[in-house]
Amino acid sequence: MSAISKSIDIDRSPEDVYSYITDPTHLPEWQDSAVSAVPMGDLPVHVGSKILVTRQIGRRAIPTTMEVVDMDPPRSWHFHGVDGPVRPDVRGRIEPLDGGTRSRVTIAVDFEGRGMGRALVPLAVKPMVRKEMPRSEEKLKHLLEHSAA
């Protein structure tokens, strides 16, 4: 399957964007379906860290353990789901714009379905994510451009 990928330009430095976006405690602030994101260990997260992310999918709260696969501050990150019937694979990239005063953020999300998740990914999960991603990136942009940190 192909990843769902969206980009947005944000009037903040790559360092600011990276710091915010890779702190899992911020996830519910900018992603509608994220109910909670709890690091399973100390912050900041690092390669090997695990995060318990709970998402509201329809009427159900679905927990997924995400593992940090790669981090290259302030340029890129890669988180991968390690349990459950639907395992997200999230890759992010930040490109500096205007001498590093602005950033282009690209987020690509794909899914591995296991068991009943094989049917859920194309029928329910990907359509929901396609709808949510543009709103999430707009929220991210607004939060970062209108906050001091």
Image (spheres, helix red, strand yellow):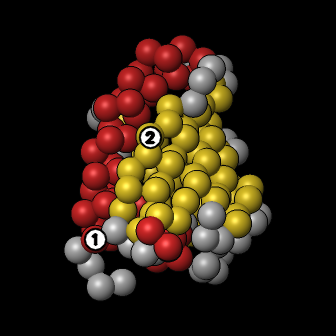
Tag 2: amino acid: Lys
Tag 1: amino acid: Glu
Callout 2 secondary element = strand
- Which residue is label 1 attached to? 145
- Which residue is label 2 attached to? 6
User: Looking at the image, is 55 positioned above or below residue 149?
Assistant: above
Whether residue 65 is visible here, answered yes or no, is no
Whether residue 119 is visible here, answered yes or no, is yes
Q: In which quarter of the image is the C terminus?
A: bottom left
- Residue 142, by quadrant, is bottom left
Callout 1 secondary element = helix
Going 60% across and 80% down the picture, which residue do you hit?
Answer: 43
| Residue nearer the viewer, 44 or 93 | 93
Pinpoint residue 131: horizontal percent, then vertical percent. Answer: 31, 32
Going 32% across and 41% down the picture, which residue do you hit?
Answer: 134
Going 39% across and 72% down the picture, which residue do you hit?
Answer: 12
| Residue nearer the viewer, 105 or 124 | 105
Pinpoint residue 89: horizontal percent, then vertical percent. Answer: 62, 41
Dot label at residue 112: none
User: Looking at the image, is 96 positioned above or below residue 147?
Assistant: above
Pinpoint residue 3: horizontal percent, then vertical percent. Answer: 57, 30
Q: Quadrant of the N terminus?
A: top right
| Mark 1 nearby-residue class (10 Å; few <14, some 14–19, many ≥20) | some
Q: First in sequence: mark 2 or mark 1?
A: 2
